[in-house]
Image: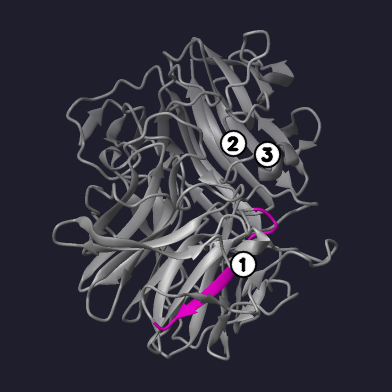
Amino acid sequence: MFKTIAGTVIMLILAPMVLAADTPDTSAWVQFSSFTYTGKAAAEPAADEYLNPIIAGFYPDPSICRVGDDYYLVNSSFNYFPGIPIWHSRDLVNWIQIGNVIDRPSQFAIRGGQVSAGTFAPTIRHHKGTFYMVNTLVGGIGNYYVTATDPQGPWSEPVRLPEVGGIDPDMFFDDDGKCYILSCDEPVGQAKYNGHRTIRIQEFDLDQKKSIGEKTVLVDGGTDISQKPIWCEGPHLYKISNRYYLMCAQGGTGTAHTEVIFRSDSLRGPYIPWEKNPILASQGLPSDRPNPITCTGHADLVQTQNGDWYAVFLACQPYQAGFYNTGRQTFMLPVTWADGWPVILPPNTPVPLTVKKPNLPAGKAPAVSSTGNIRFTDNFDSDTLGFRWIGLRAPVSKWYVISKTDRCLYLEPRSELLSGQGNPSYLAVRQQNNDFACTVTLTAQPGTTNCMAGLAAFQNEGHYYAINVKIDSGRLTEISIEQSAGTAGRGFRRNGQQPQPEILTSQALPDNTASIDLKIEGQGPHIRFFCKTGGEFTQLGRDFQSSFLSTDTAGGFQGVTLGMFAHK
């Protein structure tokens, strides 16, 4: 353990790791304490119901597997680290995060890049005592898999899959024990239209750790290539009642996102699409319906020990028009069967927010709910950060310290900025509700000087709001609200210069201010910023637009994160 004058200090890189022997001097760092998040749910379930989403906030592309009476689920995390959160449940309702599959920088071989790079669409499967997580690292090594005998980890170093093209790999184990990997890949020859993709399969030798045999195209284009379906992706293959079922997302990741199903009597096809596809869709519903759920798709199926079927899938919760800041969230619905085909949701049916609970024994409730009215306070009084905390991109140095004795977190002011594509001193949690508030206390250390620190609502490099507190000689001198330049990290330059963030409001702080409370509050389309140096919180400037942080405005695949930062 590290020792400091203040007491015992634990030094980590965003995950439980082997600790270094040196002791950082935090006298010039910024201290944060008592981070609190509160969020309000859109609905309240009855005692025999569960609430959708089952995992709220930016937890997209869910994949699920069952091992005995235990259920495990993983999500995409893109260019955040640690990555690919893994969850456990015994009743499909109470979900507890038990770790992150990618929790060591050596597993995350990507440097820089936009937030929407990184880990795409993981699949988790279990076979003969081993868990497999197969994934695409966009901007890095491409397709790969990792393994673990304990889903809490440690997970192995990545095994590259150079023979597997495209994205969204799926791993399937047939009854004879043979393993196959599917993916969404480029079409054979020239694409017939923009968004034309194929689903391919190839056998994989687990002992040799390489693909073998021929590669077969199972789906060309989608359900009906004459209609030019786009982005048939996210394949998952199942064997049910001696038939093979191939389920895919189709239509892109926006409001036309759907889930479709194909079926075959043979592993390599032909795969026939169901004439009543899609089996999950949200387009075509009235735009003024209450509590709309949109962009449904990218599903995975699981059968309970009682024989019932459920589907987990991603969907979005707009607060106004098509604007949503919570990203793609994890939803769940029971699956019904019609003429031998699985149906997640009947046509022209809105996704319900409350659903009857599965016929399973009640599982252990998490200390902090993964959905609903969410509230937690982190006093930084543990040896490690909770699994919910993430940073931007793989860490390049040890820039934060937890002090159990001081019950606080120290951040080192470094040159990396939120507007860049590096690894800034930024620790955050996901925004999990459309109506929320988060607060934190910021304190300058005696040697802290010529730097900026504060609390941010961050969507991507070009779309964030930040409460900036200027620190000089251990004193807080000025507070301002910064809005990024709206470039979405695309390297846009005007007259050869990168557009600069805009200061929306600023004011001097009272002399000798060493500590301040900061708050960000969101209510649907409105976002507000507050500070307190004594007495009550006072608002900084006016109400601002939440839509600046929405996926529809900013682009990309992730949702908003809320976190503490420090920079020079």
Q: Are marks 2 and 3 in contact (CB under 8 Å)?
A: no
Query: x and y percent of residue 345 in the render?
Result: 65, 77
> Which quarter of the figure has residue 171?
bottom left
Residue 263 lies in the magenta stretch: yes
Disc on res. 549: 3
- In the rendered image, which quarter contains the N terminus? top left
Q: In the displayed structure, does residue 545 sit left or right of residue 303?
A: right
Query: x and y percent of residue 36 in the render?
Result: 55, 46
The residue furthest left is: 207
Whole-angstrom CA distance, mark 1 to mark 2, is 39 Å
Magenta residues, as a range?
254-265
Q: Give the secondary structure at mark 2.
A: strand
Q: Residues within 10 Å of mark 2 (few under 14, many from 20)?
A: many
Residue at (48, 26) in percent of width and height: 421
Q: Quick one: label 3 or label 1, which is nearer the N terminus?
A: 1
In-front residue for pair 8/233:
233
Disc on res. 224: 1
Q: Residues within 10 Å of mark 1 (few under 14, many from 20)?
A: few
Disc on res. 458: 2
Q: Give the secondary structure at mark 1.
A: loop
Q: In the displayed structure, does residue 58 sit left or right of residue 149?
A: right
Residue at (54, 74) in percent of width and height: 261
> Which quarter of the figure has residue 82?
top left
Q: Quick one: label 2 or label 3, which is nearer the N terminus?
A: 2
* Residue 390 appears in the rendering: yes
Q: Are marks 3 and 1 in contact (CB under 8 Å)?
A: no
Q: Which marked residue is nearer to the observer: mark 3 or mark 1?
A: 1
Q: In the displayed structure, does residue 547 sit left or right of residue 110?
A: right
Query: x and y percent of residue 240 in the render?
Result: 41, 85
Q: Quick one: label 1 or label 2, which is nearer the N terminus?
A: 1
> Coloured how?
one colour
Amino acid type for the residue under numbered disc 3: Leu
